Image (tube, rainbow, N blue to C red):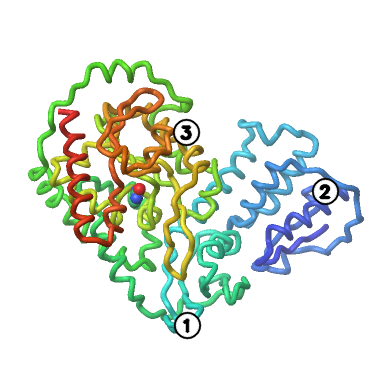
Amino acid sequence: MHRAVMPRIGTAQAWRDAARQFLAAGIPPEAILWGDTSTAPDLFGDTGAVQAGGQVSVPRSFISMASTVVWHTDRERFARLYAFLWRLKGTPHLMTDRGDAELSRLRTMEKNVHRCQHKMKAFVRFREIGDPEAPRRSFAAWFEPTYHTIEPTSDFFVRRFSDMDWRILTPEVSVVFENGTLSFREGQEKPALPEDASEQLWITYFQNIFNPARLMVKAMQSEMPKKYWKNMPEAAFIPQMIADAPARARAMAEAAPSLPPARMAQVQAQLAAHQSAWEGPSGALAGEIVACTRCPLHCNATQAVPGEGPMDADLMIVGEQPGDQEDLSGRPFVGPAGQLFDQIAGQAGLDRGQAFVTNAVKHFKFTPRGKRRLHQRPNASEIQHCRWWLDAEITQVRPKLILGMGATAAEGLTGRRDAILSRRGKVEETPSRTPVLLTLHPSYLLRLPDPQAKADATAQFRDDLKAAVQMLA
Ligand code: URA
């Protein structure tokens, strides 16, 4: 009998090396006992020596699946993977056999680990533990992952927080990034971490983006499972917000303006002729956008942010790309630019709840600066890659009018890069002939330093929103 004990750190590489060696030496699954460092040693029989064998070739798709499944907590994961690999040797098409029960089980395990990695990216909350004035600031977070996801997810945090020191402490393994070097340590008990000054800001923000009219407790808990709540400062307020939601939603409904009658016959005729390249089933689009890896922007962003709103909206509103807060919450226009938009839209009689709100680019592009992430404008290639999704959203929603805010939206919608200031207030068209009313981006208004210029640009923006309302009346 052979035995293979996988280390807690470097597990993926260790499993790959061992599996290759066993496979090359022709050792069948039933002759190997796999375990990890938590497996009782007396479970193992004698270690048998492995004769060196020849080269083995393994499909890439299996390597990719195995590199994820090894981080699952199922004690049988290493043995399952090897048994499948053994069968794969004689049946190269097994990786595409949808009816294979063991493949399907491994795929489910892979999905669980990916989901856990996603939760970790979204729910880790850092607190400052060093001197805020130090050249390299220092942060720590406590996290309790469901699977062994610390090591495979650490790259994401290195990319995002490369210019500060940080550590993520967990009961099992901790990861430390100090002076540009990543290392792993033993797990530990939950430490007492200081309250973060930005925590109150985050709580206030979370309470503000909570929309009682869209409360779906089950969906919310599936996105943000309860077990993560205890380490997330904002989650303490969720029960009260849920309790208050019905009354707040009633108040919102009573205050909502009535809808203007919306008719544009010739535009509807043009839309009927419209075709887009994306042809998935209705309802699947947002899910596909969330899984997008069409351009490198997905590597650093927390998540893609698909559009939201009624799928039969007459008006589609298109911005540039998610900002910091949109990236964290997964919803478009919930940060400062979104709040300014909501305020001016209210003055212009535009009801955002009746519009489909989205962005030309679905992932947040930024450069890290300490704990902050500074917005970067998407380039022509990123806009071009994301047009696929924007076109698909337009095809599904079939709006009568699109409000394009800012130069990136204008480019994604019309394909033209000309300056937005000379185009705002005018109606152009998408290639599929949907009318596009162009206007400024609300964050442009936020950035204008001169009060008079800001007031003028805000008035123009308000006029453009009013024009959109009138065009649909
Ligand atoms: N800016 C945008 O263009 N879109 C958002 O969703 C947020 C800020």
Label of residue 367 in the image: none
Tag 3 residue: 388
Tag 2 residue: 23
Q: Is residue 368 above or below residue 352?
A: below
Left or right of 462, for residue 26: right
Left or right of 17, for residue 324: left
Amino acid type at circle 3 is Trp
Q: Earlier in the sequence, mark 3 or mark 2?
A: 2
Q: Position of residue 347 (x, y in %)?
A: 13, 46
Determine crowd level at label 2: few under 14, some 14-19, many 20+ residues with C-alpha closer than 10 A: many
Q: Is residue 38 above or below residue 147?
A: below
Quarter that holds the N terminus:
bottom right
Dot 3 and dot 1 residues touching (CB under 8 Å) = no
Q: Position of residue 140 (x, y in %)?
A: 47, 75
Q: Is residue 91 above or below residue 332?
A: above
Q: Earlier in the sequence, mark 1 or mark 2?
A: 2
Q: Is mark 2 within 8 Å of ligand 1?
A: no
Closer to the observer: label 1 or label 2? 1
Task: Measure the alpha-carbon separation of dots 3 and 2.
Answer: 43 Å
The secondary structure type at the circle numbered 3 is helix
Q: Position of residue 13 (x, y in %)?
A: 72, 59
Tag 1 residue: 134
Residue shown at 41% from the left, 35% from the top: 390
Q: Position of residue 202 (x, y in %)?
A: 31, 65
The secondary structure type at the circle numbered 2 is helix
Left or right of 100, for residue 235: left
